[in-house]
Image (cartoon, helix red, strand yellow):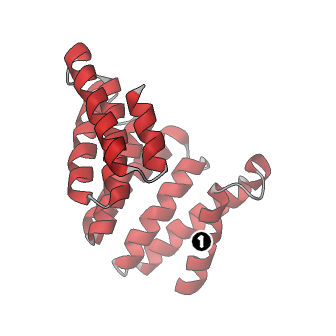
Amino acid sequence: TKSNLGLALTNLGEWRPAEKLHKEALEVQEKILGEHSLDVATTLSHLGQTYEFSGNLDEAFLTHSRALKIREKILGFEHPDTANTWARLGGIQRRRGNSRKAMEHLHVAHTVSQSLLGAQHPATAIYAHNLAGALQRLQEDEMALTHYTEAAQVLQASEQHYGASHPVLAYARQSLTRCRSIA
């Protein structure tokens, strides 16, 4: 689909052509499926990523917020896709320099993921790592250390499943490094 091509272009750093394809896909989807379908939410997320990666954080936040509303309406609050959207919004807030809002959004993503996928799931661990970073920026070092430790333990345990060179293990190494800097 056009949105998938747009995502590929985003990953190549071709922001303008990616944005154009996402918007074209969105226009067709909204016309055929209505404004509140999961396909529209997915395309909005792809468009939001394009804005995010190109540095247009205001548009990224608005676009991901719209995707979140659709996902919460259709999938409910407790769904992995909803948690991922909360995490994206937290990442955008972090990049905007709003550590308090980043922490709030990332806390939601972590809590939902922990409830749905369990504490030992790699996605939960990555959310824990990102939440720890927001907490550390807020000088909540004790809580940050708790979450960095959680992330490192889970992700290191995942090494057998993923293999030592898997990118997800980079989070474990970062978490361990940050634990040492706090302790």
- Viewport quadrant of the C terminus: bottom right
| Farthest residue, direction top | 32
Task: Give the percent coordinates (x, y) of residue 61.
Answer: 24, 52
Task: Please determine whether, in this image, residue 134 is positioned above or below residue 178.
Answer: above
All told, the count of numbered labels is 1
Task: Please determine whether, in this image, residue 142 is positioned above or below residue 123.
Answer: below
Q: Where is residue 179, by image quadrant?
A: bottom right
User: Horizontal placement of 100 versus 7: left or right?
Assistant: left
User: Horizontal placement of 135 versus 175: left or right?
Assistant: left
Task: Give the percent coordinates (x, y) of residue 103.
Answer: 33, 64
Q: Identify which residue is drawn at 41% across, 50% down.
A: 14
Task: Give the percent coordinates (x, y) of residue 125.
Answer: 55, 55
- Does the image show residue 11? yes
- Does the image show residue 183? no
Q: Secondary structure at mark 1?
A: helix
User: Horizontal placement of 148 versus 45: left or right?
Assistant: right
Q: Identify which residue is drawn at 44% across, 33% down.
A: 4
Q: Identify which residue is drawn at 38% across, 36% down.
A: 78
Task: Give the percent coordinates (x, y) of residue 172.
Answer: 63, 65
Q: Identify which residue is drawn at 52% across, 50% down.
A: 124
Task: Please determine whether, in this image, residue 33 is positioned above or below residue 63.
Answer: above
Task: Name the residue that disc number 1 marks.
Answer: 174
Please tell me how crowded label 1 is: few (under 14), some (14-19), or many (20+) other residues with Cα within 10 Å.
some
Looking at the rendered structure, the kind of residue marked 1 is: Gln
- Viewport quadrant of the N terminus: top left
Q: Nearer the viewer, residue 143 or 161?
A: 161
User: Horizontal placement of 80 versus 67: left or right?
Assistant: right
Q: Where is residue 176, by image quadrant?
A: bottom right
